[in-house]
Amino acid sequence: MKFFVDTANIDDIRDLASTGLLDGVTTNPSLVAKSGKQFIPLIEEICSVVSGPVSAEVAATDYETMMKEGRKLAKIAKNIAVKVPLTPAGLKVCKNLSDDGTIVNVTLCFSPAQAILAAKAGAAFISPFVGRLDDIAQDGMQLIADIVQIYENYPQWDTEVLVASVRHPMHIVDSAKMGAHVVTCPPDVIKKLYSHPLTDKGLTAFVEDWKKTGQSIL
Ligand code: G3P
């Protein structure tokens, strides 16, 4: 399973990249607005830190402008994944950019039917939003199970399931159980994966007992 971080905060990206566990980055217009940074230089900086896919989302919603924006974003670096919305125009952009060899991430997916369309349009990634479905009392993880099952029926589709709108560690664990290819998580959710009270308690005991030996390894 690949780990992407869902943020436009360059300090968090650098911090996570240093762990060696980070496979890519996803951004969206809301995250860029939160960063307070200029979009294009920010994406350039992220691409200089992370070699895996870096999703940069188009701002327009009409086909012609999305195509122009997508082509401009794709030129920033080889690892740019142009992010487009799951609309008829967005999927048309997806098909055309994918045919030209651009990595495309189709975002705002909330149904298996939409995921089928994205795969047929040649998307490299489909981004189903699990947390936002949970928020309206629908089962976000059931959507992941459905998409994974459908895609497994069609090995000729290369689209990877990129679980988005992740809110807690169990979204990640359940995604792994289901065989989703990628999860994109806020930095704090990735950090929570490390935590277990018995790890902390056990380590404290080992440190104290080692002191009693009076020895040094180095
Ligand atoms: O980047 C897309 C997605 O991960 C957004 O998550 O928390 O705004 O629903 P959220």
Image (tube, grey):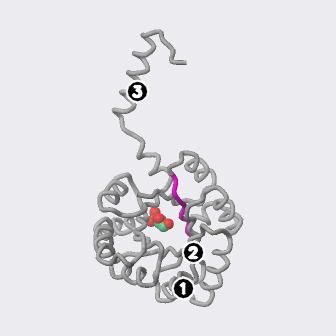
- Name the residue: 67% across, 78% down: 72
* Membership of 28 in magenta stretch: yes
Mark 3 highlights which residue?
A: 203
- Residue tagged by mark 1? 93
- Residue 166, percent across and down? 41, 60
Q: Quadrant of residue 140?
A: bottom left
Residue type at tag 3: Leu
Residue 76, located in which quarter of the rendered image?
Answer: bottom right
The Cα atoms of the two marked residues, 2 and 3, are separated by: 44 Å
- Crowding at dot 2, Cα within 10 Å, few <14 / some 14-19 / many 20+, comes out as many
Give the amino acid at mark 1.
Val
Q: Residues at badges 1 and 2 in contact (C-beta under 8 Å)?
A: yes
Residue, disc 2:
82
Vertical placement of residue 106 versus 184, above or below: below
Which three-letter amino acid code belongs to the residue tagged 2? Val
Please tell me whether residue 197 is drawn above or below residue 156 in the rendered image.
Answer: above
Dot 1: few (<14), some (14–19), or many (≥20) neighbours within 10 Å?
many
Q: Does the numbered disc 3 mark a residue whose Cβ is under 8 Å from ligand 1? A: no
6 horizontally vs 47: left or right: left
